[in-house]
Structures are given as structure tokens and as C-alpha cells.
Image (spheres, helix red, strand yellow):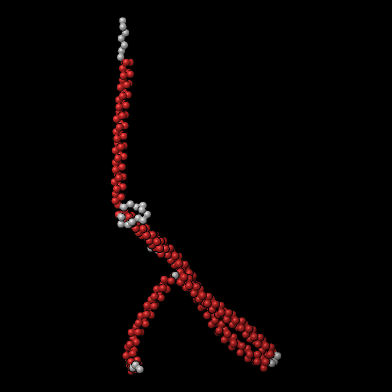
Amino acid sequence: MDAGPVLWVLSLELEPESVRRGRAKPMSGVMKRMGMIFRAKANKALDRAEDPRETLDYSYQKQLELLQKVRRGVADVATSRKRLELQLNQLQSQSGKLEDQGRKALALGREDLAREALSRRAALQQQVTDLETQHATLQGEEEKLTLAAQRLQAKVDAFRTKKETIKATYTAAQAQTRIGEAFSGISEEMGDVGLAIQRAEDKTAQLQARAGAIDELLASGALDDPSGMHKDDIQAELDRLSGGTDVELELQRMKAELAGGSSSGQQAIEGGSNGQQSQQQPQDTPRFDKQ
């Protein structure tokens, strides 16, 4: 059996705790760094995904919910106050009834009944006092909540106005930025179009260069034309020279024709003028009659 792993385990068990903690510190630093990097990446991703207009709408919605809760609290306190008022009215009505009963009992000579009615009335009066205290407390809370609801309503209205202003400004700035990016060609859509145009131009230039190179190679004879339609450089040079000679010969012939035509035309013009003079001379010679 190999004793290497056993000795390694024993050395770890015998290793002091301080040494093991010192070895764990670098790992802890790496984990902290990884956590920081992850939080930074997540924050950047959230920043790209966040839309300020949506955030403002969400905040406004939360404020409306809080305002609704405050209003419900005011309504609950008002309901409790109203219930106390009803109880107070009932107790006051019972107290008045007991007072009447005590008076009637005294009028009839029943002092014991009058004392009992007054005792009950005193107990009811204590309850009325307690309810009046609670009613005053609830009324104060209701006033506070009502004032808080009014202030919160004003803040919500001001926030809504500011929210709409910020949203309109942000939308206008976003549209202006997109228009500027479109004109400058740095937007994503226009960037893709520009890259497509650049790739098309590069491919066209490459094809044109390849076609020109193939023509030059065929003309120089470096490449063979399997169709036999293309001529080698010697034949091309001979064709060029012969073509130039034919052009020169044709040019000389045209010059000769022009020269011959001009001489014959000159002679015709001169002959025509002499004939006219011979025809006109007998007419111009004066006649002398014999006497």
C-alpha cells in the first residue's frame, strides 16, 4: 500500500489552525473580488436595461398606492369616530332615561328605585366620559391623517407634473440622439447598412482587380485560354501592327483620291471659263459693214 496519501492526510491533520486560516485568506480575497466583479457587471447590465421613464412611472404608482393607504386610514378612523358617536348618543339617551326614572321614583316615594336609577346613570356617565375621551383622540388622529393625505396628494401631483416633464425631455433627447446617430452613421441600424455597403464595395473592387489580373495574365500568355478565343502576345502585336498598316494605307488612298479630285475639278473649272470667253468674244467684236 502506498503511504504517500496517508502521510499527506496526517500532515494536514497535524497542521496548525493558524496556518490553515492563512491559506484560506487568498481564497477569501478571490471570492470577494469575484463578488465585486459580478456586482459591477450586474449593475452595468441593469443600468443599460433601465428606462428612466419606466422608473418614474413605477415611483408614481407607488406614491399613488401610499396615498390610497392613507386615505383608507382616514376612512377607517372616521368610521371608528362615527361608531363612538353612535355609542355616545345611545349612552346619553339611556342616561337621560335613567334620570327621568329616578325623578319619577322620588315622586312616587320610592327612594330605593331612585337611588338605583341614579347609580346606573353614574355608571353610564363614566362610560360616556371614556367614550368622549376616545372620540376626541380619534378626531385628532383623523385630522392629522387628513392633513397628511392632503400634503401627500400635493406631493403626488407635483411629482406627476415633474415626471411628465422629465419623460417628455428624455423622449425628445432620445429622439434627437437617434436622429444625430442616423445622420452621422454611428447608430446600430445605420452602422449595419454602412458595413454592408463597405463589404459590397470591397467585394466589387476585389472582383474588378481579379478580372483585370486575369486579363493581363491572358494577354501576356501566362495563362492559357482553353477556348482558343484569346490570342497570345505575338499574335496580338502582329494584329496591332497590321491593323495600323491598313489604317495608314487607307489614309494614303483617301488623300490620293482627294488630291485627284481637286486637280480634275480645277481643270474643269478652267475649261469652262475658256469656253465662255470664246463664246462671248464674237458677240463682243464690233461689226464693220462694207460701204
Name above or below for residue 162 compared with residue 79: above
Q: Position of residue 190 (x, y in %)?
A: 40, 62
Image quadrant where residue 281 sits: top left
Q: Is residue 77 left or right of residue 28?
A: right
Task: Depth check: give the residue in front, 223 or 273.
Answer: 223
Task: Depth check: give the residue in front, 115 or 5.
Answer: 5
Residue at image location 46% in from the left, 72% down from the top? 55
- Decide if residue 212 is in sight here: no
Which quarter of the image is occupied by the N terminus? Answer: bottom left
Which quarter of the image is occupied by the C terminus? Answer: top left
Residue at image location 31% in from the left, 12% down from the top? 286
Q: Position of residue 252 (x, y in %)?
A: 29, 38
Q: How many marks?
A: 0
Q: Position of residue 251 (x, y in %)?
A: 30, 39
Q: Position of residue 38 (x, y in %)?
A: 39, 78
Image quadrant where residue 26 sits: bottom left
Q: Is residue 53 left or right of residue 239?
A: right
- Decide if residue 119 is in sight here: yes
Residue at image location 32% in from the left, 88% down from the top? 22
Task: Depth check: give the residue in front, 277 or 250.
Answer: 250
Most extreme residue toward the top, as rendered? 291
Task: Depth check: give the residue in front, 53 or 68.
Answer: 53
Image quadrant where residue 103 sits: bottom right
